[in-house]
Image (spheres, rainbow, N blue to C red):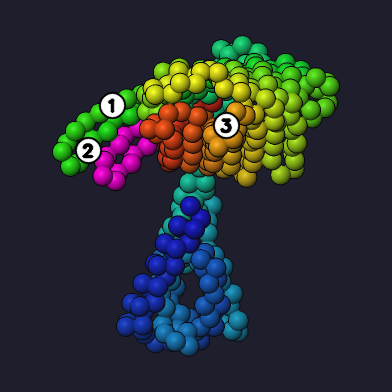
């Protein structure tokens, strides 16, 4: 608001400079140095003092300045004259100088208006902050203690030889204890595709759920943990009728609190049961590695990156890679806006199945946190 006001006053001053240059009058004897509310300073001889403006002759032009944009004026000549129109007397409420009557009232009105705008801004900030606090207090009352959740609604659009719309819904709920945590999450994606050549249309979907139990087996002060992550998936895009994975691994977490950075990494064995079109293997031993980075850059910006990398222990040339990188705007607000880039590659499937999906998704996220949740 201050920047807008400064630019507005600069524009008004420039307009008066232009007008005064064209209609300059006779010079006076007083030499005045004027500081404007825009931060500019002008020095020149006083030409005249009106009810609402001061006209001075500078080295470049004659300038007429309204009192409303004059912050201060200094007289450097020997001629005594009031720097600004005097305030009205307490008896009559009028100026002591007839030719300046009402100028002080106008200047006071402008200052009152500025003060009113600042007060309005403070009031709105207070209202928004109060509403945010009330909302969080309501959520904490509604959510059980030590529980948190998040709901995501996203959309992605791809256009090449086909137009593909992808709608995604996901979320999780989490329960924390002193040295352990349990998370239950799920997702659903609906894909609508239109072939622009022959206008053929197709729809498909995929969905799944997963759980994660993290246990700090050396106590809450230790950075070491063990996690168990079973999951289920149906994927009509990749021709997967059923996929069940389980990943058990030790891990290590490292946080840099001063920078708002949290990291996690774990590695260990995993197993998969798979029923897919044209794929004759069902039980697949694997080895996996998981990692994640969260960086709260500012109060309004967060960077997230997660990855899972799995290798088929029976066939070394098959495996799976999931990589996500995203920017979240206002992550601690009532609702957040997230932009995420993901690569989902999985070759543990039939040779004709889709192996790789790359997408950019824009989503709205609503975090819900109960009391006692670790921030």
Residue topped by disc 2: 195
Identify the residue at image location x=45%, y=18%. 275
- Could you tell me if residue 295 is visible in this image? yes
Q: Residue furthest left?
A: 198
Could you tell me residue 293's position as x and y percent? 64, 38
Considering only vertical position in the picture, is 4 above or below 179? below
Of label 2 and label 1, which has the lower sequence position? 2
| Closer to us: 242 or 358 | 242
Identify the residue at image location x=49%, y=33%. 346
Residue topped by disc 1: 203
Q: Nearer the viewer, mark 1 or mark 3?
A: 3
Could you tell me residue 290's position as x and y percent? 64, 32
For numbered disc 3, what is the local secondary structure? Answer: loop
Identify the residue at image location x=30%, y=36%. 164
Identify the residue at image location x=54%, y=52%. 90
- Could you tell me if residue 308 is visible in this image? no
State the extent of the magenta-drawn residues as a range: 153-166
Could you tell me residue 207's position as x and y percent? 43, 21
Of label 3 and label 2, which has the lower sequence position? 2
Crowdedness near tag 1: few (<14), some (14–19) or many (≥20) residues, C-alpha within 10 Å: some
| Quarter that holds the C terminus | top right
| Magenta stretch holds residue 158 | yes
Residue topped by disc 3: 315
Q: Nearer the viewer, mark 3 or mark 2?
A: 3
Instruction: Quote the CA–CA distance across marks 2 and 1.
Output: 12 Å
For numbered disc 2, what is the local secondary structure? Answer: strand
Crowdedness near tag 3: few (<14), some (14–19) or many (≥20) residues, C-alpha within 10 Å: few
Instruction: Quote the CA–CA distance across marks 1 and 3.
Output: 33 Å
Q: Which mark is residue 187?
A: none
Of label 1 and label 3, which has the lower sequence position? 1
Q: Is residue 328 left or right of residue 10?
A: right
């Amino acid at each position: 608001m201050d920047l807008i006001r400064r630019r507005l006053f600069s524009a008004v001053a420039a307009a008066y400079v232009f007008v005064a240059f064209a209609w300059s009058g006779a010079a006076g004897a007083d030499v005045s140095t004027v500081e404007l509310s825009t931060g500019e300073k002008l020095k020149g001889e006083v030409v005249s003092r009106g009810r609402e403006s001061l006209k001075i002759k500078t080295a470049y032009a004659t300038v007429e300045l309204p009192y409303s944009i004059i912050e201060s004026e200094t007289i450097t000549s020997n001629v005594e004259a009031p720097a600004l129109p005097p305030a009205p007397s307490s008896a009559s409420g009028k100026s002591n100088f007839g030719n300046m009557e009402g100028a002080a009232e106008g200047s006071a009105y402008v200052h009152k208006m500025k003060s009113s705008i600042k007060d309005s801004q403070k009031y709105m900030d207070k209202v928004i902050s109060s509403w945010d606090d009330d909302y969080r207090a309501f959520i904490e009352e509604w959510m059980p203690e030590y529980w948190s959740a998040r709901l995501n609604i996203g959309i992605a659009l791809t256009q090449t030889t086909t137009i593909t719309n992808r709608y995604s819904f996901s979320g999780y709920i989490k329960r924390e204890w002193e040295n352990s945590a349990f998370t239950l999450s799920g997702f659903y994606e609906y894909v609508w595709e239109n072939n622009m050549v022959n206008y053929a249309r197709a729809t498909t979907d995929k969905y799944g759920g997963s759980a994660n139990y993290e246990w700090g087996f050396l106590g809450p002060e230790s950075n070491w943990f063990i996690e168990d992550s079973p999951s289920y998936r149906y994927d009509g895009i990749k021709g997967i009728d059923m996929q069940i994975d389980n990943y058990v691994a030790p891990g290590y977490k490292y946080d840099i609190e001063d920078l708002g950075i949290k990291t996690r990494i774990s590695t260990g064995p995993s197993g998969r049961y798979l029923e897919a079109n044209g794929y004759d293997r069902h039980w697949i031993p694997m080895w996996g590695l998981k990692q994640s980075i969260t960086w709260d850059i500012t109060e309004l910006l967060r960077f997230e990156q997660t990855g899972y990398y799995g290798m088929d222990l029976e066939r070394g040339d098959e495996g799976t890679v999931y990589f996500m990188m995203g920017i979240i705007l206002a992550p601690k607000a009532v609702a957040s806006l997230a932009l995420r880039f993901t690569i989902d590659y999985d070759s543990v499937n039939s040779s004709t199945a889709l192996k790789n999906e790359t997408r950019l998704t824009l989503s709205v996220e609503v975090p819900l946190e109960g009391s006692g949740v670790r921030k």
